[in-house]
Amino acid sequence: MTRAMTFGTRADAYDRLRPAPAPGALDQVLPPGVRRVADLAAGTGLVTRAVLARPGAPAVVAVEPDPRMLARLATTTPGALAVRGVAEAIPLASGSMDAVLASSAWHWFDPPVATAEIARVLRPGGVLGLLWSRADPTVPWVAQVRGIGNAAADGSARLSRRGFDVALPPGHGFVDELPEAVTVRWTRRMTRDDVAGMVCTYSGVLELPAAEQDEVRRAARELLDVVLPGTDDVDVPFETVARRWTRAG
């Protein structure tokens, strides 16, 4: 199993515990009037549902390679068309989409091939929006908890260190609309058990044997009691980072 395909082993927990993108971040990547949206590496539908909840309810095609994640998406997100596929071979007609989104997924793609495919399915003037949603790593206790079991070494770690400074491969007619990444922050109330469980939905933990994953969860739960004494519920600081490009033509 490749690291990118580990998420399906905890599809239910992923769907329940991972954050959906902040609405303000979606505003950055979805201009008014968008009617047809493809959500690449859609996972369990966190972004798909957020797009469907927007005014005007654009039609969304959720494209996901892992059948376990796709099954969860189909159950929780009946308003979307769920199809199995990858960013390097998008099962959609040329010029059929107003927008293509990918959330916390660009690091799993082959950028030259995926960029060409995204350009193919977008109409001229369509947009590519990249998003990354996560617990805010600049908050000390978040960094401590994410450090357990190498949870912080998820697939986006390298992009994170570069401030999500993504440059699309040239030659596909994209104009960078957000050369500076836009970050939207918010908080979400979670139980300590859920925070510890969320740590175990990152690829750096999911690739561990099951017993070691359980140990990570236990250690994360114990650390929370040390660094955040008080009631069971915790205000978890989250952020969504957004980038957007427009297909010229």
Image (tube, rainbow, N blue to C red):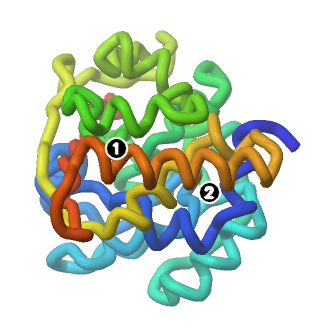
| Mark before the other along the chain sequence, 1 or 2 | 2
- What distance separates the C-alpha of mark 1 from that of mark 2? 32 Å
2 to the left or right of 138:
right
**Other residues around mark 1 within 10 Å, as few (<14) / some (14–19) / many (≥20):** some
Residue 145 at x, y percent in the picture: 40, 39
Q: Is residue 171 above or below residue 202?
A: above
Outermost residue to the right: 1
Residue 46 at x, y percent in the picture: 42, 66
Residue 174 at x, y percent in the picture: 36, 24
Residue named by callout 1: 134
Instruction: Evaluate whether residue 104 shows in this view.
Output: yes
- What is the three-letter code of the residue carrying label 2? Ala
Q: Which residue is at a point 54% across and 59% down the rendered structure image?
A: 42
- What is the three-letter code of the residue carrying label 1? Arg
Residue named by callout 2: 93
Instruction: State the quadrant of the C terminus.
Output: top left
Q: Which residue is at a point 69% across and 37% down the rendered structure image?
A: 88
Q: Is residue 52 above or below residue 6?
A: below
Residue 74 at x, y percent in the picture: 61, 82
Asked if the residue at tag 2 contacts the one at tag 1, i.e. Cβ–Cβ closer than 8 Å, the answer is no
Under circle 2, the secondary element is loop
Q: Is residue 34 above or below residue 136?
A: below
Instruction: State the quadrant of the N terminus.
Output: top right
